[in-house]
Structure formats: C-alpha cells, structure tokens
Image (cartoon, helix red, strand yellow):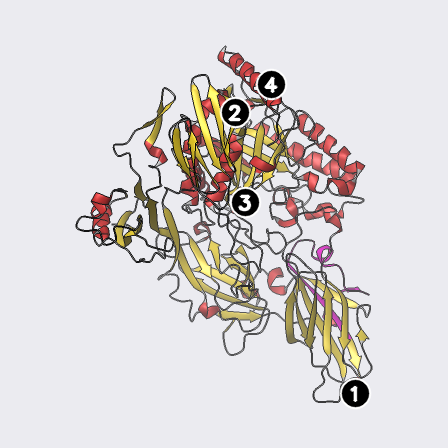
Amino acid sequence: MVMSSFLFLITTLLSLLASFAVADGNKTLGVTYDGRSLIINGKREILFSGSIHYTRSTPDMWPDLIQKAKRGGLNVIQTYVFWNIHEPVQGQYNFQGQYDLVKFIKMIGEHGMYASLRLGPFIQAEWNHGGLPYWLREVQNITFRSDNEPFKYHMKKYVTMIIKKMKDEKLFASQGGPIILVQIENEYSTIQLAYREKGNKYVQWTGNLAVGMNIGVPWVMCKQKDAPDPIINTCNGRYCGDTFTGPNKPNKPSLWTENWTAQFRVYGDPPSQRSVEDLAFSTARFISRNGTLINYYMYHGGTNFGRTSANFVTTRYYDEAPLDEFGLQRDPKWGHLKDLHRALKLCKKALLWGYPSVQKLGQDLEAIVYEGHGACAAFLSNNSTYMAKTISFRGRNYYLPSKSISILPDCQTVVYNTQTIVSQHNSRNFVPSVVANKRLSWDWETYTESIPTFEQLENKATNPLELFNLTKDTTDYAWYSMIITLGRGDLPMRANASPVLIVASLGHALVAFVNGEYVGNGHGSHLDKSFVFRKPIKLKEGPNHIQILGSVVGFPDSGAYMEKRFAGPHRVEILGLNTGTLELTKNRWAHQVGLYGEEAKIFTLGGLNKVKWTKIEGKRPALTWFKTYFDAPEGNHPIAIQMNRMGKGMIWINGQSIGRYWISYLSPLGQPTQSEYHIPRSYLKPTGNLMVILEEEEEARPEEIKFVVVDRDTICSYISDIHPPPVQSWGSKNNVSEYTANNRKASAVLTCPDFKVITNVQFASYGDSIGICGGYQYGNCNAQDTKEVVERFCLGKHTCQIPFEKELLIRNWDPCPNVKKSLAVQVKCGFK
C-alpha cells in the first residue's frame, strides 16, 4: 500500500483526535470514519467480514451459516442485493422465501453481527445477467451503466425502493440496525473507459444518488479510484496489501471488499483452490498496512438454484470457501482463519491507537510495528516464496517459514504464523443413502419431447432469431426449424460421401436433429461462447426438416454494453451435396420458445398428468424427461445427488429446480467439473418426493444416479516442533500476551462437528508420515505406541487435545532417533 510517512502520521493524528472526542462522551448513533478506521456508534472496530448470499441458500440454512461465521471470528456479513430476483417483471416485486432480504438482515443483527449491503444494482457475482433484470434490455434507447437517462431512471427507482425498505424496517446502524456499510455500483472502473465521458459522468451521478439517500452510514465503491466524496473507494483482489494504492483521500480508511477465498468454477474447469496459507498471508499483510476491514468473498458460496448462474458458471458456487456449498466447515480454511482473527484481535489496541513503523531486517524480511498508548504489536514478514529464514528482532530470534507473517501481539510472543497451521483439518464424505436409494435402480418413467417441424411452429422469420431476445430469460431453450426440398440429383451418390450440417452459433449450446432424428450436440465455453457445430447427416429425396434446439447456459454477467450481447445460431449450411454448398441462413425459419414439458410444468404434481409417462425400455432418446419418487435420506446431514452416467440438463425436486447439471462437459483432467448437486432438506417431505430430470443428450442412465448424505466427520491434525500452541491459549493482560492454558507446548486439538464424538482413530503417526487428511500414509519412521496414546486421549470424546511431547508419544524406544518427527492424526466422528 503506497502512503508517505508524513501522510500516514497526519492520518493517525486525525484518528486520535476523533477517538478522543468519542472518549469525551460525544457518541452518536451510526457510522462515521477517518483515516484509521470505521467508527461504529462511537467505537473503533477492526472488521472481519464474510460474503454469504441469501439467494444461494435457503432460510432454514441461514441461522447455521451466520452462527458458523461468528464462531469463525467474523463480525460482519456482506451480501449483494439481486435486482433480477426482486423485480423479475417490471413493477412486480418478490421478497418471499429465500429472497426475503429483510429477514436475512434482521437475522444477522439478532446474532450480534453487522451487515454490509452491496446494492449494485449491477453486481456481477457470477449471477445471471449480473443481477440486472431482462426487461431492462427492452427499454427503448437504454445503455446499461452509463450516463443514459433510461438506465438512470430505472436504477434510481430500484435503489430508492431498496433503501426505503431498509429504512422502513430500521435496519441501518443510524436507526439502531445492523447495516454499517452500503455499496453502490460494482467494479465500474473495469469498463469506465468504454463509455468515455459518459462513464465519468455516470460515476459522479451514481455517487450523488447514493449520498442523497441520507442513510447515516458510509457508502463505498469498490475498485473506483475516482469515487466522489464522501464515498470510500475500496479494494478487490487477492493481494490488496500490496496492490491497493490506498483511499483517494487521507481521511478515508483502507477497506478490502473482496478477498477471494477461492475461484468460482465454470463448466469445463478442473479443480481449483486457494490455499488458506496464502489467504491468511494476504489478510495479515493488509491489516499490518493500516487495513481495518477485510471481507472474504465468499465465506459461503452456496448453490445457484434454478437458472440463476451466469454463462457457463456451475451450479455449485465457491465450494472451496471456509464454509462449503452445504454449509459445512472446510478445515483447515475455516479454523486457520479463525485463529488469524483471534491473533489480530489480540493486536486491536495497538492497531487502532498505535503509531506504525517499518523496519527492514534483510532481503525479503521486514517488521511492521504498531506501538503507543501502552500497546505494541509486531508483524514479522518473510516475503520470500521459496526460503525459510531466521531473523533477529528486539534481541530475540524468530523462525519464519517462506512467504509467511508471524503475529506478535506484545512485540515479543509469536501466537500465530500464516504458514503454520495449528487448527484441525477435515475431509468431506459423500455417503450413499440407504433410504433414498431404495427405488432409484428400477422405479423410473420417461417422456420424450416431440421434435417440432417447420409447419408446427408459428414464429416465422427469414433468419434464425437471436436467442437472448427470443427466450427473454424465461427458459434456456428455443427451437429453430426450417424445411428444404431436395431432388435425387442433389444427394451424394458415393457410399463414402455424406452431407454435413454446419451451424455457426454465438453460443451457448445446441442439439441438432434432421427429420426428427438426433444428429448430435455442441457447445462453446466460458472463454469463447461461440462455436461451430459440424456433423454428417442423412437426407432424403423430397422435403427435409432441419431442427435445432438452441440453448443458453446463463446470461453474461460482466463487461461493457451487456445489453448488446447475442447468442444462438447465426449461420447454417449443408456441405457435400452434388449441387454444392447449400446456404440455409436466409431460407426462412420457424421458432418456438421453450419445451413442451416446461410449458406444461410436468416437473410438478399438477403438471405430471399432462403427458404420458412410460417405463424405461431400450434406447433413451435425446430430450427425454425422467421421473421417480424417493423418500428423504436418513439423518439430518446435507443431501446431494450424484448424476452418474447423465449428460446435460436440469433437475427438479418437488417442483423446485436445484439447477443445471452438466456431466458430459469434461475438464482437461477427463472428469466432470461438478458431479454432486445440492438438494436442500427444506425442499423435501419425509416420503414420496418427486424428482424430475430433463436430459438433453442420448443414452442417459438415470438408474446409476445416487443420493448421498454429506458430512465432514473425518477430522485430522498435523503438528510439528515449529508449530506454536493454539492461539486460543493466549490472552492479553496489561497489553502483554499471556498464556492461559496449563501446557505451553504445541498440541493436536480435535473437535467433532454437531455434538458428535470420536468413535475411531483411523490413523496416528509420530514420525515422518505423508499425505493429507483423508489419505495419510506411514513413512519410513513411526513410533509404535502413537495410536494407543491417541485413543487414550480421544476415544469417546467430543474434543480432545494431544500434547506434542516426545516422552508421551514414545514410551518404550525411539525407532528412528535421527528423524525430525511430526504428529499426524486422523479420526472418525459419529454419534454414540
């Protein structure tokens, strides 16, 4: 973060003056700020925030998600507000069920946490159309996100409506509510230049609109250096401690609105993740450089139910966040960040009141110290990405792993290192459900869509119509059909020759038929939506029907001029005829929006009987609907369905869509990007649940589908002699770190989820084991008594602590005295 020493000193003095005013009793209800921090109801705060989107979970999940966030050391929940969910049809509003924004914000406050509201109205968020409702595209003369009167009119109307709803419920901190920050627009600087002067004017207009709402809490704009006063410009990214050039005025605090905990996935992606060590390092670095708010995007990603994901984005969202898609704690990410928050809170007085200084300790080494008002905290940094180092600081030596920061809340004692994980690990298990899978292997019925001909469709045009405008975001699908008449002389005579159908599409996917017979399917990618479909076809003398089902996989969610994006077939040809290439693009086309099964809602109990269902027999054509019934899985764990041997389509449970699935689109590693799909328990009845699946491709095998219950009951710990004691063992007395536990050595701490107990020690090694949680293996050295010791400490207990002591772990003889040893433990949790 770039900031001169003089400017930093002035900022600090301003902070102290403001704080002394608070100390004199001039407290006000609401949120103010200065160059050091936000001041909430007269009190300075270091804020740890996490993004949890109410639309990507269900209301029955919200309390547990918020509680786990709070236990993880967060004091703020951040969420976007989703315009296209709340106003899907112009003037018709929806704030019910999982879209109940007021209920969600109130629940955050009831848990003693703050809320940060990101209004947009453009949000990106890998959400369909970036949160903008489709009907905006049809407003005459509109240009999104520009100094454009039609867009500004509708944006102002929407923002005013949301703000009024929050005010009416007294949800702003200035009214005694939990909302302490509100964001307007979203990363606008990434497209601002495309609109030239109209982009600059739009930023100023947007800022004036926000400030004029008089909500009594600060407004922010992320990644917007020219944010107009008094709006705070904030940082988004992975390493804002190094890349953020700072607020655009010295009286504004340094805030980080998106610290990415992972990487969202698109279909076709291999697995990806961000290590918690890297995440912790970036967080500690930002705080050490005068940052006082960090938001983890996402803390819980959740599920893109229905058709809510943006183009090619998977139904599962940010599964590698501290809370996974199902709301389960992903350790060590959740636990290591919890420890980090604890360590930083021990530094709170020094960070908020002390004077900063920087000391270079060698190449890639530095100490950032906050000292004053009886407090001192130090951050010792090793910025080398490949070499651990030992440094001398204030007369003591400290070991620093590569690319790590050690936190010393009293400038003496290391209570936390970003690279050294003391918290437990866990492994996710997908366990087949005995109850739900009883009928799946045999109790399936099917209905296959008819393939419409040109004459059966009414919407006629010379060219294929553009797909976004045709579907109007009411469905993923639209039919394109045309007819050509061929003579005998047009058809190839050679046995090894065949006509080829070529369809150039702007995206995203299609299924092709000729004379009602399946030809094949094709698709683009997130990187390049357009593609060219080429398949040999069989034609006959006389009339031939070319039938194409075009489909979208979400609307775009980013970039300039989103209202001018297009999709669908735009050029069609047949090669290989005796008369040469046949251009069909302008040969007159007929269209139909959606499938009959969608229109009849055959995925609901009310619509089931509108078609004739039959038992599965023989061939499974493309565009087949499958249905079955199942009972709710046993227990109360989260539920998923494994879509084994399926292709591409959508799933409904009791009439509610749980999202798109796409198994046939393999990653470069030869595996589906997503195989398991979340079914919220709130969607289920105890028995007789209806599941309907639309499958776009041929030869699907629904008999191979499996229901699974999801747990993280496999927990582990890995400790060595460089690990400090758990940070929970430290407290502060008279601004000096003080050890509050009996044992001052490192230890392996294991805690089962959901009040379960440790039922089995699956692995225990004091030696040189290898592997990760869920897959540990013995190395060349292992103390024979380790498992017995762990069992004595842990079996039958909800939580246990195993001291890292050689005398305890080796009771008889050391099989490898010259080997540097670590303790690796893996246990299984369950109910008694």
Q: Earlier in the sequence, mark 2 or mark 3?
A: 3
Single out the mark in the foreground, 2 or 3: 2
Q: CA distance from mark 3 to mark 1?
A: 58 Å
Q: Which residue is mark 2?
A: 357
Sequence-wise, which precedes: disc 4 or disc 2?
4
What whole-number distance in Å separates the C-alpha atoms at marks 2 and 3?
44 Å
Give the class, few, some or many, for how many residues have Cα within 10 Å of label 2's Cα (few <14, many ≥20).
few
The amino acid pointed to by label 4 is Ile
The foreground one among 661 and 703 is: 661
Measuring from the top left, give residue 256's x and y in whole percent.
57, 34
The residue pinned by badge 1 equals 488
Residue 325 seen: yes
Q: Nearer the viewer's eye, disc 4 or disc 1?
A: 4
Q: Position of residue 159 (x, y in %)?
A: 66, 34
Which of label 4 and label 2 is nearer to you? Answer: 2
Q: Is residue 420 magenta?
A: no
Rendered view: 769 above or below 212:
below
**Residue drawn where x is 52% and y is 24% of the image:** 357
Q: Nearer the viewer, residue 767 or 416?
A: 767
Front position in the image: 335 or 43: 335
Boundaries of the magenta span: 455-483
Q: Which residue is mark 3?
A: 55
Q: Label 4: which residue?
A: 10
Q: CA distance from mark 4 to mark 1?
A: 89 Å
User: Looking at the image, which is closer to me, 142 or 689?
Assistant: 142
For the residues bearing labels 2 and 3, Cβ distance under 8 angstroms: no
Q: Position of residue 328 (x, y in %)?
A: 42, 47
